[in-house]
Structure formats: structure tokens, C-alpha cells
Image: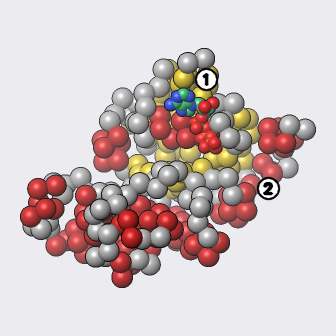
Amino acid sequence: MSSLRTTGLTKSFGGVRAVDDVTVEIAEGRINGLIGPNGSGKTTFFNLVTGLIRPDEGRVLYRDRDITRYAPHRIAHVGLGRTFQLCRVFPRMTVMENMLVAVRRTRLRELLAGTHATGEVERARHWLTRMGIEHLERAEARNLSYGQQKLLELAAVFMGDPDLVLLDEPAGGVNPALIERIVTLVRDLNAEGRTFLVVEHNMDMVMGMCDHVIVFDRGAPIAEGPPSAVRADPRVLEAYLGV
Ligand SMILES: Nc1ncnc2c1ncn2[C@@H]1O[C@H](COP(=O)(O)OP(=O)(O)OP(=O)(O)O)[C@@H](O)[C@H]1O
């Protein structure tokens, strides 16, 4: 079964067709990479799929369910989670509070009253431990390093128990040791059955981690396949290097 499928997905900003008639399929169970030069439409594609912006045309199907007009929280609820290029955490909340607001069922009032279910706190601890930041539970998010904030954002995404996870530049602005940790985490989570779609400019990371790579240029896919084939594809070299 396909995890995610888009048909004819199109979005223009003024005269720019940021995403131009995109029909792609993301198979379940893989680590998929989405690469392409700056401005090729990768983030816009993510924003369309996760309901942040509405397409001008086309459809988004998640596990064969049409989610094209769903609001972002509803999309998260059906099992599709995402991180952002510029990491999004609530700076003045503690790490644990960030984890608990990520759960749709936890209402803000309960959070402030400290009456959230202990099950949620335990689940939050589980994910913080997996990301290696459990010792920071009581710290305010703004006091974490950028890399730690990225791990927190990732941990919070897993509070929604997603089957498909979209990562927007997970290696951006983080040190090589942390990149290694993120790669290991993604591989482990994939081995447990979660599908990934990763936008990333770090080619070593993409080529080393992904099973399947889709290449965008000017708003549409120009090539896809295993990393070795994509890397050798003349169309890809041309898009990147203009040769
Ligand atoms: N909100 C917006 N308003 C106007 N133009 C936009 C908007 N968002 C994106 N664009 C334009 O759409 C095109 C695709 O941008 P997008 O950010 O999706 O590309 P990208 O592949 O994610 O780029 P990068 O790798 O630099 O993050 C670009 O020409 C960009 O300038």
C-alpha cells in the first residue's frame, strides 16, 4: 500500500508555480529522501501535504484516504507527523510541557493545572529517553542548544504516534555527531515500521540513510530511485550543476 500519494498537486505564488502538477507515491516502510536545488518546491510540497497551505489543484491521499482539505491537526491525527526547517518549540515552556501540548488530548487547561494523565507523562519520558534528552525534562526549551531543540521537536512529533514522518532539513544547523544520532534514530524508527520522507541538503546524509530518493526541480519531480541511481542520473546533475 502507498503511504502517501499526490495527484496533480499544484500551488502558485503570484507567477511562480512553486509546486507544479506533482504526482508522486511514497511507499510504506521506506526512508524516502526529497532533494532538489533551492527553491525547487520541497517545503511548499510539505506544506501542502500537511495542510498548512491549500493546493490550487490536485489531491493528497494518505493511506488511500483523501486528506486534501483537512486542517493540520486533523492530518496529524490520522498519523502524519512533521518537523520544520526552522525548529518549532515553545521557548518558555519546559521540555515536558512541550511534549504534553503536542498531544491533542491534553488540553491547555489541564496542562496548566498539572492534571494531565500520568500515561502521557510516561509516554513523553519514553520519547525523550529515545532522543537522549530525558535529563532536560524540567529545562525551559529556550535554554536548550539548537540541536537539543531539534531532538525535542522530533520527540514531540512522536507523541502523535505517526506512521509517516516528514522531516524538513533535520541536519540543518546541527553538528556531525548529532547528525549521526538522528540517522540512527530514523533507521531504528523505520525498522519499527514507520515511514519517513526527508527533505535534506546534506547529500551524505540523504545518500547514506534513504532507500529511495525523489528529486525535484522547478516544482516537479525530475527523477527518482535508489540513491546510487539518482546520484548518477544526468538530469539530476544538470539540475544541481547546470551542466
Ligand atoms: N509564501 C510564499 N510566497 C511567495 N513565494 C513563495 C512562498 N513560498 C515559497 N515561494 C516560492 O516558491 C518556490 C519554491 O519554494 P520552496 O521554499 O518550496 O522551495 P524549497 O525547495 O523548499 O527551497 P529550499 O531548499 O531553499 O528550502 C520558490 O520560488 C519560492 O520563492
The image shows residue 3, relative to residue 145, as above or below, that is above
The disc placed on residue 17 is 1
Mark 1 or 2, nearer chain start: 1
Q: Quadrant of residue 174?
A: bottom right
Q: What kind of residue is marked 2?
A: Ser
The x, y position of residue 96, in whole percent, is 28, 70
Which image quadrant: the C terminus?
top right
Q: Position of residue 235 (x, y in %)?
A: 83, 38
Residue furthest bottom as drawn:
135
Q: Is residue 55 visible?
A: yes
* Residue plotted at (28% across, 76% down): 138
Q: Which mark is residue 228?
A: 2
> Residue 181 — which label?
none
Q: What kind of element bears circle 1?
A: strand
Lateral position of residue 209 relative to residue 134, left or right: right
Q: Residue at x 40, y 36 (%)?
A: 51
